[in-house]
Image (cartoon, rainbow, N blue to C red):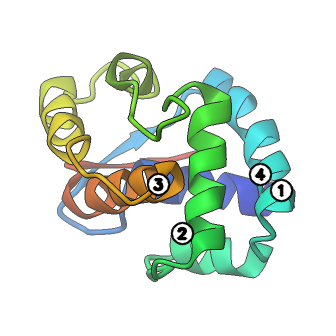
């Protein structure tokens, strides 16, 4: 399960495209996010292998359980409020020094305009948008 949570962090923050700048998630952020992601896997009934597939660049579709998983992680870590709206200032803390934070913030602001029919869908739409448009891809190594 720990492996799946690590892979979620990769999928949540960036997508897998060669033209993206690769940045490394600070260890203290990994330590904050992993326990929450593992808890949310259980709460949302998301099968761990699907999270691995998503981290590999495959889409999760719009299934409610995946929306619930992403919303759970975002809200329990404080990266989104209960309505599914992203806390951009807090989310920006994930990105280490040397990251083009201005470009990342611009995409976050653009993607934070995404709205769903409910809070989990709003969180999911943000994640999907950010994954597609992010100028960076974060790794744990």
Residue located beneath label 2 in the image = 55
Q: Which mark is residue 120?
A: none
- Mark-to-mark CA distance, 1 and 4: 5 Å
Where is residue 28? Give x, y as percent.
66, 21
Between disc 3 and disc 1, whose residue precedes? 1
Which mark is nearer the camera, 3 or 2? 3
Provide the secondary structure element on which disc 1 rests.
helix
Total count of labels: 4
Provide the secondary structure element on which disc 2 rests.
helix
Residue located beneath label 1 in the image = 43
Is residue 5 rendered to the left or right of residue 109? Answer: right
Q: Which mark is residue 40?
A: 4
Q: Which mark is residue 118?
A: 3
Q: Residue at x 83, y 56 (%)?
A: 43
Which mark is nearer the camera, 3 or 4? 3
- Mark-to-mark CA distance, 3 and 4: 18 Å
Which mark is nearer the camera, 3 or 1? 3
Does the CB distance between marks 2 and 1 fall below 8 Å? no
Where is residue 103? Give x, y as percent.
12, 34
Which mark is nearer the camera, 2 or 4? 4
């Amino acid at each position: 399960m720990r492996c799946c949570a690590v892979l979620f962090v990769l999928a949540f923050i960036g997508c897998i495209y060669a033209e993206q700048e690769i940045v490394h998630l600070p260890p203290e952020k990994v330590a904050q996010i992993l326990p929450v992601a593992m808890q949310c896997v259980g709460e949302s009934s998301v099968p761990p292998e699907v999270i691995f597939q998503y981290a590999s660049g495959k889409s999760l579709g719009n299934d409610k359980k995946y929306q619930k998983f992403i919303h759970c992680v975002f809200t329990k870590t404080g990266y989104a409020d209960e309505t599914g709206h992203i806390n951009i200032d807090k989310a920006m803390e994930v990105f280490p020094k040397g990251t083009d934070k201005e470009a990342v913030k611009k995409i976050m602001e653009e993607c934070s305009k995404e709205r769903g029919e409910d809070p989990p869908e709003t969180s999911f739409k943000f994640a999907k948008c950010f994954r597609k448009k992010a100028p960076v891809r974060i790794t744990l190594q």
